[in-house]
Structures are given as C-alpha cells and as structure tokens.
C-alpha cells in the first residue's frame, strides 16, 4: 500500500493518482483532521469564489438577507439605490453583529451594543456621543467592510476574499454553459428563489457532500425506494444496454476546469420544464406541452431538447451545487468542524411560471430533496455512516476511487471521474502542487 512519505522538498499529497495502473486513492485523513480543516479555511475558502445568494432574494430596495458564507457572518443587501451589496456583519467599533434579523427591509442597520448606525449601502450614518471624539476625527473609513471581490453571473452572486483572484466569469469558465441551461428555462431569462429555505446539519465532513451530490453510482442502492416509487407511479425507465452500467439511464460526467464538474444525464424523472411523466397526472399534460412549445419557439428544437430532456448536477468548486433535475435546487454547505457540516438549500424557478407549474416544481423539490423526501434522509444517513466508518482511518487509510479510470472516450455518470476532478483540484490548492 502507498505511504504518505515525501522528500523534504516535495509537498505532501493527499491522493495517489496513477493513470498507468488505473488507480486513484484518497488519504482519509483529509476527511477527519482538524488540521486539514484549518488549512482549507486558508487555502480554499479564503482564495476561491464562494456563493453568497441569488439576486431575486432582494426584490426591493432595502431588502437584505443575513447569513453565514464560508463561516463568516455577512449581509447580502440591495441598497436604497438598487445596488446589490455584500458586507461583513461586523460593527467597526467593537465587532458585534450589526444585523441580527435573518431577512427584512431596512434603510439602516444599528448595532445593539453601542448604537453605531450604518446606511444600507454600508456607510456609517451616526456615532452616538460623537462629541467625545476630537473635532477632526475621520469617520469616512468606518463604514461596514466588504469582501475584497463581489461579482455575479446571471444573478448568482459570489464573494472572494482574495483581491488578486481572477474575475468570476474566468473562474466559472465552462460551468457557465450549464448555468445558462438553468436560466433558459425562463422565457424572460429571469429565475427566482422560491419562498422557503431548507437548513440542516450532517454529522460528516463537508467534502462528502460534494461527492454525494454528483455520485450517481449510489442511486440504485441508496435510493432504491425512490426508484420503486417512480416505477409504481407509471414512470417507465429503460435501462441502458451497456452491460457495465448500473444506472437506470445513460449519462456522462464532465470536468469543467478549476475544480468544477457536472453530470449530464438523459432525463427520465420528469421536469417542470416540460418533460411530462405519469406522476404529474393527465391534467398537467396540456400545460407542459405548451411550455415545451414555448421552449422550441424561443430556443429551437435542439436547444429546447437540451433544456427539457436532460438533467445535471453541477458543482461549482468548492461548495455550491446546482441540481437541475425534477426541480432546480441551489445547495451550499460549510464545515462546522471536521466531522460536521451545515447545509442550506433553496428551490429556483422561472419568475413567470403559472401557479400550477410552480406547485409541480415545489412538489418535485420536496419529494426528492426535501428533509422528509426520498433522497435527503437517505443521503444524510449514508454520509454519517461514512463518517462513522472513518474512525478507523489511521488503520484503514485509503478510499478507493478508481472506477472508470482509463476508460476510453467520455466518462460515464456511474464512474468516479467527476469525484477525482474535485479531489485533484482540492489537493492542488492544499499542497501548492502544480497542475
């Protein structure tokens, strides 16, 4: 078995990546170590673009959302002039939170400790008892601090703590092609986060959620109940003829660069963007036919088929997942220690869709991804069982992740190519190794 010994001048690697032998192994210390977590905070979360929120969460001037992003309390806000902003939720005086509400609409934020007040553009509005300062005391630089970078792609807003990071669009690279497929579901090109947020903790390392979000290999075993439910609901699933596939449909996995990757599958589970299945009932058929006709007219037959008849689980490195399947789900997660993560998820849909189409979308979101749905409870249990098993990591050190390694042509969604994509980029950032 491999060892972790390296020469004095070589950075330590957490992976064994041997194309000649077709072997890829992950050192399980990466999934249990608090020292590794501290290095991740420095080398990954402080360097990469991290998802903050969607612009539709701030519909009116003065709207705000306060949340934790990469472990930091921030305020995601639209100021009185309509500009979208991001501030650290930290008073410049003594460091207290200046916003304790989860969301709302305000002109100003007020610190409850000493009463310092900030406008919704982040500027300092008032210091109580300011006569105690010298006459020419400069307050111009005492507004709320912002991340070094704050940019958006198609109303998905990201922050970056590294002022020297590449532009967001350069960072996203080919991942923008898959974000576009999501946005094109809307005739106006405008999507909105639907009311309601899912929040839950998982007693497992955060990187296991990255793997699970795109690991189609686990579908027939972990989600057999859901597959049976679909079959019993009249959904006909034609297994692929390839003898080496274990999944109900054929799909592929793609490396999109910069650690981003996606699955890209032929759809069988029905989409509110006009892939009708018996589960939706005959009453939905006419409306979904109309939705599809609009897609064809607007996008052309080939692009409409791409939007309606395929689904994808897209990972934006390090911790954003956009599941574009039977519904569109935005999911983020952040470590709360090496063995625990906090997960947040939202549903996304076209702003103009009808009440009935919206109901189908929400039903699909809750049925599969909801906290009581077919997928989420099973996935949480599976990940927590993994973390429990990793207690033996020092005596059973390596996770085997070689499935599909060396396969000619396109990588299948039942392979582990996309998982290796994540771990290679993670390992590069953690070790400073060259690509």
Image (cartoon, grey):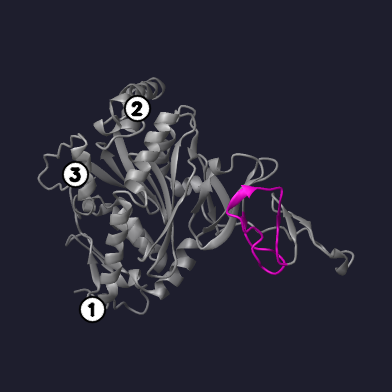
Label 3 crowd (10 A; few <14 / some 14-19 / many >=20):
few
Between disc 3 and disc 2, whose residue precedes? 3
| Residue at the (48%, 41%) spot, across then down | 194
Graded by Cα atoms within 10 Å as few (under 14), some (14 to 19) or many (20 or more), the crowding at tag 2 reads: many
The quarter of the picture where the C terminus appears is: bottom left
The mark found on residue 228 in the picture is: 3
The local crowd at label 1, few if under 14, some if 14 to 19, many if 20 or more residues have their Cα within 10 Å, is few
Instruction: Provide the major secondary structure of the magenta segment.
Output: loop
List x then y, in percent, for residue 279. 27, 34
* Residue 154 position within the rendered picture, expressed as x and y whole percent measured from the top left: 50, 39
Q: Is residue 262 visible?
A: no
Magenta range is 87-113
The quarter of the displayed image where residue 134 is located: bottom right
| 427 sits left or right of 350 in the view | left
- The tag on residue 302 is none
Is residue 180 in sight in this rendering? Answer: yes
Indicate whether 114 appears above or below 123.
below
Q: Which residue is mark 2?
A: 304
């Amino acid at each position: 078995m491999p060892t972790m010994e390296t020469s004095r001048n070589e950075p330590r690697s957490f992976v064994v990546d041997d194309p000649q032998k077709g072997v890829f192994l992950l050192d399980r210390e990466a999934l249990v170590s608090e020292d590794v977590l501290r290095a991740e905070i420095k080398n990954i979360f402080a360097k990469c673009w991290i998802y903050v929120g969607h612009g539709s969460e701030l519909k009116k001037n003065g709207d705000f959302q306060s949340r934790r992003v990469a472990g930091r309390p921030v305020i995601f806000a639209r100021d009185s002039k309509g500009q979208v902003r991001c501030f650290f939720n930290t008073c410049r005086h003594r460091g207290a939170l200046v916003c304790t509400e989860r969301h709302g609409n305000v002109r100003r934020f007020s610190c409850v400790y000493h009463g310092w007040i900030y406008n919704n553009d982040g500027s300092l509005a008032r210091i109580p008892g300011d006569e105690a300062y010298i006459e020419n005391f400069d307050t111009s630089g005492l507004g709320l601090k912002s991340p070094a970078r704050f940019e958006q792609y198609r109303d998905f807003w990201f922050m970056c703590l590294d002022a020297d990071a590449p532009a967001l669009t350069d960072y996203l690279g080919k991942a923008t092609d898959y974000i576009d497929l999501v946005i094109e579901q809307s005739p106006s090109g405008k999507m909105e986060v639907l009311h309601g947020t899912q929040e839950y903790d998982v007693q497992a390392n955060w990187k296991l959620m990255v793997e699970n979000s795109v690991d189609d290999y686990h579908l027939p075993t972990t989600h057999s109940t859901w597959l049976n439910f679909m079959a019993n609901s009249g959904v006909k699933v034609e297994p692929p003829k390839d003898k080496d596939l274990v999944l109900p449909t054929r799909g592929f996995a793609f490396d999109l660069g910069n650690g981003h990757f996606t699955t890209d599958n032929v759809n069988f589970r029905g989409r509110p963007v006009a892939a009708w299945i018996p589960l939706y009932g005959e009453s939905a058929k006419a409306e979904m036919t109309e939705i599809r006709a609009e897609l064809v007219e607007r996008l052309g037959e080939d692009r409409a088929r791409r939007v309606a008849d395929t689904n994808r689980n897209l990972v934006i490195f390090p911790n954003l997942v956009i599941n574009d399947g039977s519904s569109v789900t935005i999911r983020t997660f952040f470590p709360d220690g090496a063995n625990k993560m906090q997960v947040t998820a939202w549903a996304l849909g076209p702003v103009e869709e009808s009440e009935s189409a919206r109901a189908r979308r929400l039903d699909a979101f809750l049925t599969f991804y909801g906290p009581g749905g077919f997928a989420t409870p099973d996935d949480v249990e599976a990940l927590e069982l993994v973390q429990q098993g990793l207690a033996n990591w020092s005596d059973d050190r390596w996770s085997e992740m070689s499935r599909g390694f060396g396969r000619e042509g396109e990588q299948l969604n039942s392979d582990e190519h996309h998982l290796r994509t994540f771990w290679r980029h993670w390992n590069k950032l953690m070790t400073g190794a060259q690509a």
